[in-house]
Image: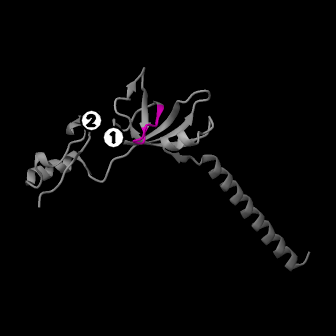
C-alpha cells in the first residue's frame, strides 16, 4: 500500500466514522422530539396513543381535582370549547393555578382520551414581579396597593413567595 492509499484509507475511515456519529445523533433526536399541540389542534387531528407530545394552553377554571397522594387531574383549554383532561402525578410548579398558562409533556393513555403528563411547566407573563421586589417598591413609595393585582393573594406557599404584579408610579 502506497503512502497516498494509506492517507485515502484514513480519510475514508474518518468520514465513515463522522457519518455514523451524525446518523446516531439524528436518530436519538428523532426519538426524543415532542411536538407542541393546543386543544383545538387535537380536536382537528387526533394523535395516536403512546405518541409523545407537548400540550399547551390554560388550566381550565374549576377543573383542578386533587386525588390520592400527589395525583392531580385538570383540564387544559385554549379559550375555545375544546378542553383536554390531563392527569399528572408529582409536585406541581409554584405558579400552577387555574387560568394560568401551562405546558404539559406526556402521551395519551391507550384506549382513553386522558392525557397522562410526566412534566408540567407553569408559565407567567412579563408583568410578574417577585413579592420581595414589590415590597421594596412599596417601602420606597413607588408602588401603591391599588395599582397592581396580586397573584395568589401575595401569600407564601410551601415556603416560597409567589409574587405579585406591580407597576411603578410616574
Name the element at disc 2: loop
Residue 43 marker: none
Q: Which residues are magenta?
A: 77-86
What residue is rendered at 42% in x and 28% in y?
72
Count residues near mark 2 (Cα–Cα under 10 Å), then give few for <14, some for 14-19, many for 20+: few
Image height of 18 relative to 59, above or below: below
In the shown orientation, is residue 101 left or right of residue 168? Answer: right
Count residues near mark 1 (Cα–Cα under 10 Å), then give few for <14, some for 14-19, many for 20+: some
What residue is rendered at 29% in x and 33% in y?
158
Image height of 16 relative to 77, above or below: below
What residue is rendered at 90% in x and 78% in y?
2
Q: Nearer the viewer, residue 82 or 99?
A: 82
- Residue 122, horizontal then vertical, whole percent: 38, 42
Q: Quadrant of the N terminus?
A: bottom right
Which residue is the site of mark 1?
95
Which residue is the site of mark 2?
159
Q: How many marks?
A: 2
- The answer for how far apart the CA atoms under marks 1 and 2 are is 13 Å
- Residue 23, horizontal then vertical, whole percent: 71, 57
Q: Earlier in the sequence, mark 1 or mark 2?
A: 1
Q: Nearer the viewer, residue 47 or 130?
A: 47
- Residue 84, horizontal then vertical, whole percent: 48, 34
In the shown orientation, is residue 30 left or right of residue 82? Answer: right
- Residue 71, horizontal then vertical, whole percent: 44, 26
Name the element at disc 1: loop
Does residue 166 show up magenta in the picture? no
Amino acid at each position: 500500500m502506497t503512502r497516498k492509499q494509506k492517507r485515502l484509507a484514513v480519510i475514508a475511515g474518518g468520514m465513515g466514522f463522522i457519518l455514523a456519529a451524525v446518523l446516531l445523533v439524528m436518530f436519538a433526536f428523532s426519538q426524543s422530539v415532542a411536538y407542541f399541540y393546543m386543544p383545538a389542534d387535537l380536536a382537528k387531528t387526533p394523535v395516536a396513543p403512546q405518541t409523545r407530545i407537548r400540550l399547551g394552553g390554560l388550566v381550565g377554571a374549576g377543573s383542578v381535582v386533587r386525588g390520592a397522594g400527589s395525583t392531580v387531574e385538570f383540564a387544559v383549554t385554549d379559550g375555545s370549547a375544546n378542553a383536554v383532561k390531563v392527569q399528572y402525578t408529582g409536585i406541581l410548579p409554584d405558579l400552577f393555578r387555574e387560568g394560568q398558562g401551562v405546558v404539559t409533556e406526556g402521551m395519551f393513555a391507550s384506549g382513553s382520551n386522558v392525557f397522562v403528563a410526566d412534566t408540567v411547566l407553569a408559565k407567567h407573563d412579563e408583568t410578574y414581579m417577585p413579592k420581595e421586589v414589590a415590597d421594596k417598591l412599596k417601602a420606597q413609595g413607588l408602588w401603591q396597593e391599588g395599582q397592581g393585582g396580586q397573584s395568589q393573594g401575595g401569600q407564601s406557599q410551601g415556603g416560597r413567595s409567589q409574587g405579585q404584579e406591580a407597576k411603578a408610579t410616574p
